[in-house]
Image (cartoon, rainbow, N blue to C red):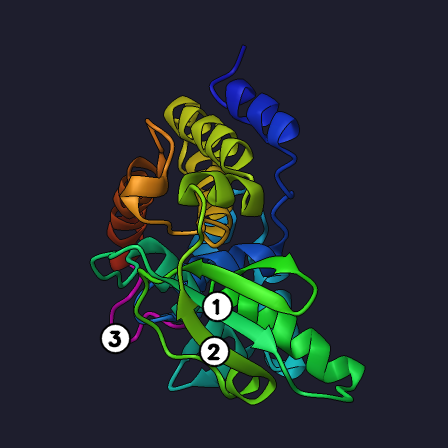
Amino acid sequence: MDHDTPVRDAAERLGLRPLTARSIVLSTLLGHHPPRLPARALVRVGELFGVAEGTVRVALSRMVAAGDLQLGEGTYGLTARLLERQARQDESRAPRTRRWDGAWEIAVVTAEARPAAERTALRQAMAELRLAELREGTWLRPANLERTRPAVAARQCTWLTGAPDGDPAELVRGLWDLDGWAARARALLAALSDATSPAGRFTVSAAVLRHLLADPLLPDALLPAGWPGAELRSRYDAFEAELRDLLRQYVTPGSAA
């Protein structure tokens, strides 16, 4: 059995997406701060996966043409849409929380005659705010997060503060699949432990970052015992440090060719 067999087995078991040249570039930039790198660094990451230099450079050109990347001063950086995605990912890794006093934030849709695009935009905004839908048009969560509500949410909803009459932990279990999230998190942690090659760790770490976006970021008092969120964040932070070390030799003036 070669060293990457456990990683391939975990990837199949977890349904991890195979990394294309495009996804390698995006995952690298989304996990890098600032999200701008010379072509040489991105080519090097592609080589870790056996992706030829020419394939990576073609992907870079296509991504610039598609508006995913912008080229400037010999480096490739994320465009505004993807910068927003990186900001959401950063928030999922280091959430801005406040002491929870038992209050819940509640959003009730009160706008009328909403076109489909508005309804879709609101649903996306609520997901990014980490609210759960109790019933159609009513969203809520414990009020323990500090973040700005986007205009679409303020425009379509009336916002209230309240608290459930019953057990809030029971309500939480009905709103989020906490057992499912924790089980996948533990499987990803095990896959990270099994991954020894840079390519294997990169593949699993990209999945970790996506999974953190689905963490409801609940108060500790409402989480099941042994919740793996903090450990998953810590392990991703360690991977990001490894990636920075790997890229440092390729991120120097004049290295973009």
Q: Earlier in the sequence, mark 3 or mark 2?
A: 2
Residue displayed at 51% across by 73% down: 82
Per the image, the residue denoted by label 1 is 106
Left or right of residue 5, residue 147 in this image: left
Evaluate if marks 1 and 2 touch, with contact meaning CB atoms under 8 Å apart: yes
As drawn, the residue found furthest toward the top would be: 1
| Residue 48 in sight in this render | no
Along the viewing direction, whichever of 50 and 226 lies nearer the viewer:
226
Q: Which of marks 3 and 1 is in front?
A: 1
Q: Which of marks 3 and 2 is in front?
A: 2
Per the image, the residue denoted by label 2 is 159
Quarter location, residue 127: bottom right
Q: Does the magenta stretch include residue 149?
A: no
For the residues labelled 3 and 2, the Cα–Cα distance comes to: 50 Å
- Quadrant (top left/top right/bottom left/bottom right) for the C terminus: bottom left
Per the image, the residue denoted by label 3 is 253
Query: As displayed, is residue 252 above or below residue 47?
Result: below
Left or right of residue 67, residue 211 in this image: left
For the residues labelled 3 and 1, the Cα–Cα distance comes to: 50 Å
Q: Magenta span covers which residues?
A: 249-257
As drawn, the residue found furthest toward the left would be: 99
Give the class, few, some or many, for how many residues have Cα within 10 Å of label 3's Cα (few <14, many ≥20): few
* Label placed on residue 5: none
Q: What residue type is labelled 1?
A: Ile
| Residue 237 percent across, percent down from the top left | 28, 47
Residue displayed at 25% across by 49% down: 241
Query: As displayed, is residue 28 above or below residue 193?
Result: below
